[in-house]
Amino acid sequence: MTSTLIQVSHFSYRYNQESEVALKNVHLEVAAGEFVAMIGANGSGKSTLCNALVGLIPNYFVGYSEGRITVDGKDTASVSVGELSQTIGLVFQNPFNQLSYTADTVAEELAYGLGNRGVPRDEMFSKIKKIAELMQIDELLDKNPLELSGGQVQRVALASAIILEPKILVLDECTTQLDPIGSEQIMDIIKKLNESGITIVMVDHDMERVAELADKVYVLQHGSIVLGGTPEEVFCSPQLAEFSVSPPDYYEITKNVIQPGYREKDFALTESQAIALLQEVLYEDRNQEPQA
Amino acid sequence: MKIEIKNLKHKYPSGGEALRGINTAFEGSDPIAIIGQNGAGKTTFAKHLNGLLRPTEGQILIDGESIHEHTTAYWSKYIGYVFQNPDNQLFLETVRKEFEFGPKQLGVPRHEINDRIDFVSELVGLKHRLSTHPFDLNATEKKFCTIGSILMMDPKVIILDEPTCGQDVEGNQRLTEIITYLKNNDRLCITITHDMKFVVRNFDQIVVMAKGQILMSGSKNLVFSDTKTLLESYVTPPPITRVGQALGLKDISFSKEEFIDHFTRRLHQR
C-alpha cells in the first residue's frame, strides 16, 4: 500500500502583478516514494507549482490562490515554510539563489539549515562530511561560496537541500550548469535517494532523462496539467506535440526504423532499450535473410 | 576579425591556475562551440577574448593588435560577451533601457538605436516585454534580454556563455535563429554550452577544454568520434550519436534523419 504524500486539490494561483493565472485548477496526487517529473514549455507553471508545493506560495509570494495543497498531511497555507521544510526541500532553478551567501565557507553554508534545526555540532560535522563526499564537493568546503563556478554552486545548492534529509525533494532544473558526466552523476545520486524512499518531484527539459527516471510524468501548459501518466503513456500520446514537448530522441529513431506491429513493442524510450531493440532488429533480419 | 591566442595562461589571485597554455585562433563566421567539464576554464578563457580578464602570461592578438593596447570598453565594441548568470549583467529598470545602454555608450544615433530595438527585440522574442523590469522576466527571458543588449551593440564577435540553461523547445529554436542570423551577417558566434544535442544541431567547429587546456578541436565528426578524449573532458556524445556508436554503424549520426538513413543502409547492406 502506498500512501499519498502530496495532494494538490483544484489549486489555482495568480501572482499579484499579473493579469493571467499562473496555475489553473491543478489536481495532482503524489504517492510516497514516487519519482514524478513535470515537463512543459517555459511559462507553463512548473516553477510556480514547485513554489506552491514547498509553501513559498502562498506564504512568501504575494498573490491570490484557490484550492488546497497538503504535504504529508499538512495544509501548506496554514503552516510556516520553515515547518514544511522539515518534510519537503526545494532546489531552485537558479542555484545562485539557493545559497545564503551569509557564510564565509561552503561548510558553513551547508551548516546553515542544520543550525536552524538545532542539530548538535558534532552531528553537523559528520553530516557535512558525508554529504560533501556524496556530492563530490570535499575540496570546496573551505572555499568562499562566491568563488565557485556555476557547476560547483549547483552541487553545493543540491547538497544544502539533501543534507536536511527531507521526505520529499523538489528539483527545479537542478543540473543546468553541469557538464554531461557531472549531470549523470547527480542524477545517479537522485535515483539512489529515490530508491532509499525519498519522494522526488523533478522539473526538467531533458526528455531522455525524464523517460529513464520517472514513474509518472505530468505535462503542464498555460498553468494546467494537460497530460499525465507513465512515461510510456505520456510520450506515446498523439497529443504531445500540441503541448510543445517532444518525446525522447530514442522514441523517434526507433519508431521510424521499426515496422509498426513488427514486434510486441515497436519503440524505445531509453538508451538501453533503444540499443537492445535495434540490435535485435539487425540480428533477426540477418536470420530472416532468404537463402540464396 | 581574427583573434589569435598564444600560450595564454591565467592565474587567479587565490593561486589557482585556470588556464595553462592555450594556443588557438578564431576567424571567419562559422559558429564555434566550446565544451568541456565544469571548471575546465571555458568561462575564464572566453572572458579573455574581449579583455574582461587579462592574461597572466601569453598573448591575445585581435587583428594583429595586442589586447593590452586598449581597454575592455574599447574591445567590447567589437567583441561582446553575454554573461553566464544574467543577474550579473542586467542593471536598468526596463528591457528597453538595457537595449539602449550599449549603443548609447557607442554614440549610435537615436533613430538607428530605435531601428535596432525593433529588430533585436523581435529576434530575441522580447518585443512585448520592452517596458518590463528585467527582474520581472523569467529566467530564460532574462537570458534573451542579456543577449539582446549585446546584439544591440552589433559586435563582430559575440560570445554566449551557457545560453541553453533552462531553455525549452521554443527557446532552443530561437537560439538557433540568433546563431544563424549572426553567421549570415558575417558575425562570429562563440558559444559555451553543456547541451550536446544543441551543439551538434548548431555548430561544426568544436573546441573541447579540460583542466585549463584545449584537449582537441575540430569538426563535430572528428570530435564526437573520439569518445575516449571526450570522456576525459566529462562529455558524452548526444543520445542519437551514442545509439549509432553502440550499434557500430559505420557513419556517425547527429540527427534523426541521419540515423534512420545509416541504420536502414546497414540493414540492407548484405
Image (spheres, coloured by chain):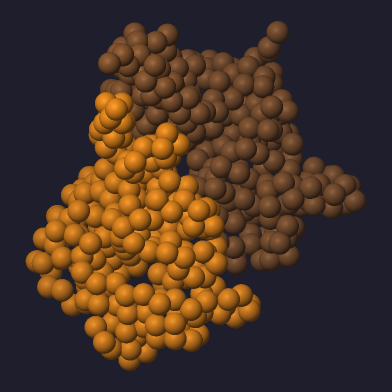
Q: Is residue B191 above or below residue B9?
A: above
Q: Residue furthest front?
A: A292
As drawn, is A42 to the left or to the right of A214?
Answer: left
Residue B38 appears in the picture as rendered: yes
Image quarter of residue B203: bottom left
Residue name at image x 68 percent, y 33 percent: A192
Colour chain A is painted in? brown
B118 w.r.t. B40: above or below: above
Q: Position of residue A261 (x, y in %)?
A: 34, 8
The residue at 74%/40% (across/down) is A164
Look at the image and tell me in which quarter the N terminus of chain B lies.
Answer: bottom left
Note the chain letter of the orange one.
Answer: B
Image quadrant where residue A214 sits: top right
Give the left or right position of residue A107, taking residue A211 as reference: right
* Quadrant position of the C terminus of chain B in the picture: top left
Q: Where does residue B82 sit, x and y in percent of width and height?
A: 35, 63
Q: Which residue is nearer to you in this view: A261 or A146?
A: A261
Residue B187, x across and y down, in percent: 20, 66
Of residues B35 and A220, the one drawn nearer to the viewer in this rendering: B35
Comparing A118 with A130, the one in front is A130
Left or right relative to A34: residue B2: left
Identify which residue is drawn at 64% across, 62% down: A145
Count of picture labels:
0
Which residue is at 45% across, 68% downward?
A: B214
